[in-house]
Amino acid sequence: MDADPTGIALPATDRSAGPASAYQAPELTVVIPTFNERDNVDPLLAKLRTALAGIEWEAIFVDDDSPDGTAARVIERARTDSRIRCLRRIDRRGLSSACIDGVLASAAPYFAVIDADMQHDETLLPDMLRQIRADGLDIVIGSRYVAGGGTGEWSGHRIAISRFANALSRLVTRVRLTDPMSGFFLMRREAFDRAAPSLSGQGFKILLDLFASSPKPLTFAELPYTFRSRTFGESKLDAQVVWDFLMLLLDKTVGRFVPVRFALFAAVGGIGVLVHLAVLAASLAIGFGFAVSQTTAMLVSMTGNFLLNNLITFRDRRLKGRAVIRGLLSFYLVCSVGAVANVGVATMIYEGDVIWWAAGIAGAVVGAVWNYAASTIFTWRTR
Ligand code: GDD
Ligand code: MN
């Protein structure tokens, strides 16, 4: 058995060992993340029962306290079928983290992740299981982009977005999958356990996360399926999901060196310096005095930085309406203290006989770290 980074030493896949109890963990756990999918519960269960006949399976629904009562529906079904369980999460949202929690609650040697809305083709599950065992793979993925698969009734617009996201993630993660965005796959739990400690768990893209977080490359196969259209409920894919996806990519690349949010903050700061210089130059050219020009440049660049950070860096905590004014004022305040710290530190270092540009850089770094830390606490604070 491999060294187990999770600290839970699991006997490989020997299901005959253990105390003489009537219960045996099933071979396959089907993890189903749900948010407002009440009307899909019964049709999905019916489809799973048919597709998985002859396989020992269980289903774990992970529901983020859907207002439509999905959890209640699942629990009702769980009362008459011991293969069904509901993991209800309160005060948490997120497709990836829901999948992770579901897998962590399973004792089976294999698990699958499938959407509740029947857009994924559950009849593929037995083939996936057969192949993962026959070839000793870590994971088998349902793909829309291998020969025989398809995106069904998708609009050209959505296909284009999907292809672009695919290309981008291949570029960034070096993961050679035809459908890295797929939310439909079957995996060996030991392989999951190895990746679990490093998973980012953010957003929608659990598959990409698993590949990018595995300590050794996952051995995989892809099986074609056609994405069906939704009958009940609606998709949760929105701008936030796209944002989370980009953050995941950044986290798995620059995130190894600096926190993604700080990198964004610093990039915005860099733009701010350019804005400052441009305004300063323009103002001097018009004929204003230096002090006036410098003050104008500072106000413009601080305001610009605030708006950009509000739009990008702190998108998930974006200030709206009146909070924007309060936030802007607190950002001015934070940056003023940062500027004082910047000049103070730089001067101190410069006086210690250090070359001017090194002192300047040191001051700027101290200022940037202060601005970041303080604005995280005061301007874009979490409730
Ligand atoms: N627990 C939980 N929490 N479940 C969620 C959440 C959440 O915050 N958001 C979405 N879900 C559930 C939905 O209820 C559904 O069962 C599944 O996750 C997929 O959500 P959809 O909103 O239907 O996503 P989609 O159809 O646009 O995209 C899906 O399929 C694509 C192709 O495989 C997702 O699985 C994508 O990740 C995937 O790329
Ligand atoms: Mn869907």
Image (cartoon, grey):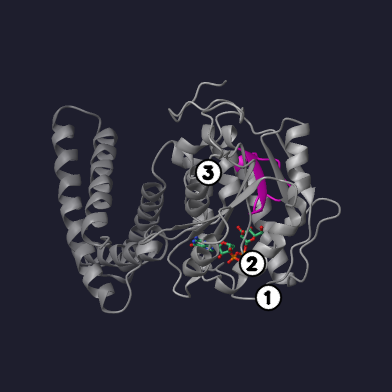
Give me the residue at 74% from left, 63% from top: 227
Q: Tell me which corner region of the image, top left, top right, bottom left or bottom right, holds residue 346.
A: top left
| Alpha-carbon span between mark 2 and mark 3 | 22 Å
Does the beta carbon at disc 1 come under 8 Å from ligand 2?
no
Does the beta carbon at disc 2 come under 8 Å from ligand 2?
yes
**In this image, 219 relative to 355: left or right?**
right
Which label's residue is closer to the chain start, 1 or 2? Answer: 2
Dot 2 lies on which element?
A: loop
Does the beta carbon at disc 3 come under 8 Å from ligand 1?
no
Residue named by callout 1:
231
Residue 142 colored in magenta in the image: no
Above or below, 121 against 174 in this view is: below
Residue named by callout 2:
117
Q: Give the range drawn in magenta.
A: 173-188
Residue lying farthest to the right in this orientation: 148
Answer whether residue 53 is visible to the viewer in this image: yes
